[in-house]
Image (spheres, coloured by chain):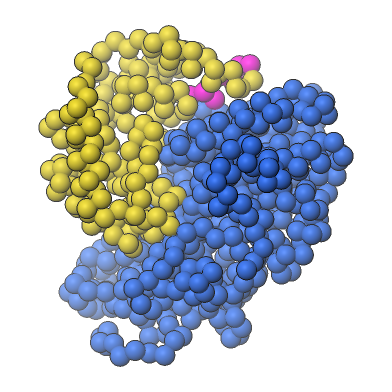
Amino acid sequence: MGRKLLLEHINVPGINTFEVYREKGGYRAVEKSLKTMSPEDVVEEVKKSGLRGRGGAGFPTGMKWSFLAKPEGKPRYLVCNGDESEPGTFKDRYLMTHIPHALIEGMIVSSFALGANTSYIYLRGEMMPQIRILEKAIAEAKNAGFLGKNILGSGYDLELYVQPGGGAYICGEETALIESLEGKRGNPRIKPPFPAISGLYNCPTVVNNVESIAATVPIINDGGDEYAKIGIGRSTGTKLISASGNLNKPGVYEIELGVTVEEFIYSDEYCGGIANGKRLKAVVAGGSSVPILPANLILKTINNESRLMTYESLADGGFATGTMLGSGGFIAYDEDQCIVRNTWNFSRFYHHESCGQCSPCREGTGWMEKVLHRLEYGHGKLSDIDLLVDVSKKIEGNTICPLGDAAAWPVASAIRHFRDEFEWHVTQPQEAVSRNYGLANYADPLPKVEKVAAN
Amino acid sequence: MLKLSDTEEVIFSPELITKFNEIVSRYPEGKQKSALLPILHLVQAEYSWLSATAMDKVADYLDIKPIEVYEVATFYTMFFLKPLGKYVLEVCRTGPCHIVGADKIMKHIEQKLGVKEGEVTEDGLFSWRGVECLAACGMAPVLQIGPEYTYYENLTEVKVDELIDSLRSKTATKPENS
């Protein structure tokens, strides 16, 4: 069994309440940091831990913190990013629902480290139940003297508020989130200036994912060095993985970074294999934005090494044969899933969620959706496949925020690895609307079972 | 579509104004516009949709221009700009829900309610629509119902029937206040 740092007490009855959370050692990190450490010490521990942003980008959290400007007379803000809208990702909702105090405690420690006296937790608007849960947890913590004025006699003041969004994927992008928190449309800002210099209300601001903030609690409790002992190389600590799709046991799992993908999919400790006795066709390993990989490439790298659940191993081979850990949204596809249909579905998502500021994204996502729709419904041409690649390349890197890239990658990677399935939709349109292509010839590393030939 | 012809007068109750005031107090002096999204959620929970007159009232309250409210209300998909049913069943249609049967669930809801996406049943009780990822992919397929945004997870056609029937009977036993 891997070590659990965030979900250790998930099954303890009443762990959502302050009393039980406290009994289980909760709020020790607040006591330790506020009573025995300076804000700089806290930043230093987080740096030592090697913690990388758990929202998707994987940028080192401690380094992000150290960029925060500290001009005289200006407030600084910590904003927690709980927008969690990346398809395939549901770990933050799970954590906040069951152990809300883990986030509240992390917010206090992190706000102290950054010198923020007012901090906001921004949740997607659909998380109204979680907003109530967090507001109750905040009231409990305040009642116990862990929030408000002069916390634990340290002289440090902190107020914590929860803010709802309105149902917009783009608000997971940190500058769009800040705009939204200011009561505006979620249009990402042009950078620089980065939020660390000019963020919320033009003040220095740090935006961190829910899981990143919660992870500061075990880091402060046990020390950054202890945290860094878990994992492999620059992938330190534990990570919450949201597992969904055609799995026997979908759900949220806390893994030590470094377990193999094969163990994660097939072992009983985690997903328990593919549902209904079917075979694995493909995996999206880090949320819908990251490149989809066929089963053979997700289980083994191109060098025939076991693929590990780490930032580096999943990225091994670049986009040619690798992918990304992203937000840890792990979606498994069985042999009956249609890659063209799935790609069309994702394209519709990105078209719907594009904020519309940048033409390549606003128009390009729409075109990709349309072309994929006609391929899926048997009206495509062979030239459409290269057209899609062309459009995706013209979006990638040409937009203010990474939504453009996020829309382009799934399309480009699906064609890269499953071109024969796209071509089949063009050459056999009648068949393509009546049945699925099944396993691509190269998609499954396991011994082949007799199947009807595709063509 | 924004129903600008809507002229029904909107007066926020003192209880609602108290809630607005508490929300505004969370932000620094002069940054009351930050309260816009939370307030729109409260207004929608109260009136079940955002009419132009209601949005104008919000603009008045926050001392911002009406367009600043409209542009936000039209950007975020959770805000309804026309009246929908009392219960709006919002079914996740994205990737992970899609591959485990979201389409089937939506088709079933359409048949069961007898209305198309975005329409309202004759009794005014139900509307339904597909929405993008609800962050509950491990419990797919999933749908939500506002204003509390309760999630109904691991949906089957039978569960959808039970849900719709229970909402119907709940309303039948509790007469509406007009």
Q: Position of residue A311 (x, y in %)?
A: 64, 66
Q: Residue shown at 39%/33% (left/top)?
A: B148
On the image, which quarter does residue B43 sit in? top left
- Horizontal side of A369 relative to A380 (left or right) equals right
Q: Position of residue B177 (x, y in %)?
A: 23, 17
- Horizontal side of A288 relative to A198 (left or right) equals left
Residue B104 higher or lower than A311, as above or below? above
On the image, which quarter does residue A414 sit in? bottom left
Q: Residue shown at 31%/78% (left/top)?
A: A438
- Horizontal side of A66 relative to A246 (left or right) equals right
Q: Residue shown at 42%/81% (left/top)?
A: A443
Q: Main secondary structure of the magenta part?
A: helix
Q: Position of residue A23 (x, y in %)?
A: 68, 42
Residue A105 higher or lower than B22, as above or below? below
Q: Which chain is represented by blue in the image?
A: A
Residue B8 higher or lower than A79, as above or below? above
Q: Which residues are magenta?
A: B29-36
Q: Which chain is represented by yellow in the image?
A: B
